[in-house]
Image (cartoon, grey):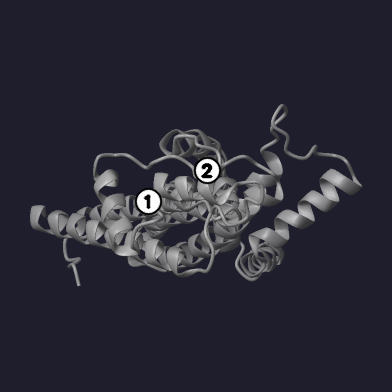
Amino acid sequence: MTKYVAKRILLALVTIFIVCGITFFAMNAIPGGPFDGEKAVSPEVKAAMEKRFNLDKPVPEQFVIYMKNLLKGDFGVSAKTGRDIGKTIFTSFKVSAQIGGMAVVVAVIIGIIFGSIAALNRNKVPDRLIIFFSSLFTSLPSFVLASLLLLVFSIKLEWIPAWSKDNPNYILPVISLAAYPMAYVTRLTKTSMLDAMGQDYVRTARAKGVASWKVLFKHTLRNALIPVATYVGPMTASILTGSLVVERIFTIGGLGSKFVDSITNRDYPLIMGVTIFLAVLMVTINLITDIVYKIIDPRIKLD
């Protein structure tokens, strides 16, 4: 187990380093720079600003300097605002984590409930309705759903106010982020429950006269939730790192919005900081998930 964990941690560190390298060199390969659009800045000031951010040095040397600072925990400051990038990421991620956390809870709870109802009513009306809507949500991109929800419920009907800094409303952003994973959990729960309901131990329990609710919760649903539990880790990483467009649509000042702004402004330090943070977040969650897999099933190998 220790050897497995060590290998997974080493692989995670290599993955993060590769992400840093690809992002850094790809970003510098794009024509232009963060100060090219500053019309009011004189050439002398622009040169001084590029020197301040080491942009006057060759790209490989810039990468070495950046990695050295990163190992000290220094993400640098924004090329546009001058604010500390570490503090900016921490502040904006709190907003993204709140919305993402609520979306994960909604997706898991409602997905399990709907999946159980569909399995217990196989080929009946509730099953067909649930499968229809789950198929719809799995094929509908989150940014399309977010735009539709905003247009219908905030602009046309005016039932739910749009997001604002003074009056944050989490309902529509959470629905937009939770729709796809909720539909996936629904289908996963239904499939797992149907499989569990056909097992010998369930038939034996029924033959012994065990109460129906006990067969459902103790023997069927409990075992059917194992695949769902293994999906929660990747799903959480996907929601937390994939809310970029949804945050932009609802003008939420989360990490996704900061990332989009940094790309628009060619704010190289902020692009690198947010990319590395998201990469570390995703790699860490996947690492924890892999270790949990190994604990659940020791036969899993690092291949």
The tag on residue 69 is: none
Pick the front one: 50 or 100: 50
- The quadrant where residue 55 appears: bottom left
Residue for point 40% across, 48% down: 51
In the displayed structure, does residue 50 sit left or right of residue 8? right
Q: Residue at x 72, y 62 (%)?
A: 144
What is the quadrant of the N terminus in the image?
A: bottom left
Residue 206: give x, y in percent of width and height. Answer: 41, 57
Q: How many marks?
A: 2
Quarter of image, res 201: bottom left
Label 2: which residue?
A: 105
- Apparent side of residue 171 relative to residue 15 in the rendered image (left or right): right
Q: Nearer the viewer, mark 2 or mark 1?
A: 1
Q: Name which residue lies at 31% across and 51% down.
A: 66
Q: Residues within 10 Å of mark 2 (few under 14, many from 20)?
A: some
Give the residue at mark 1: 54
In the image, what residue type sits under mark 1?
Asn
Most distant residue in the top direction? 166
- N-term-proximal mark, 2 vs 1: 1
**Few, some or many C-alpha atoms within 10 Å of disc 1 (few <14, some 14-19, many ≥20)?**
some
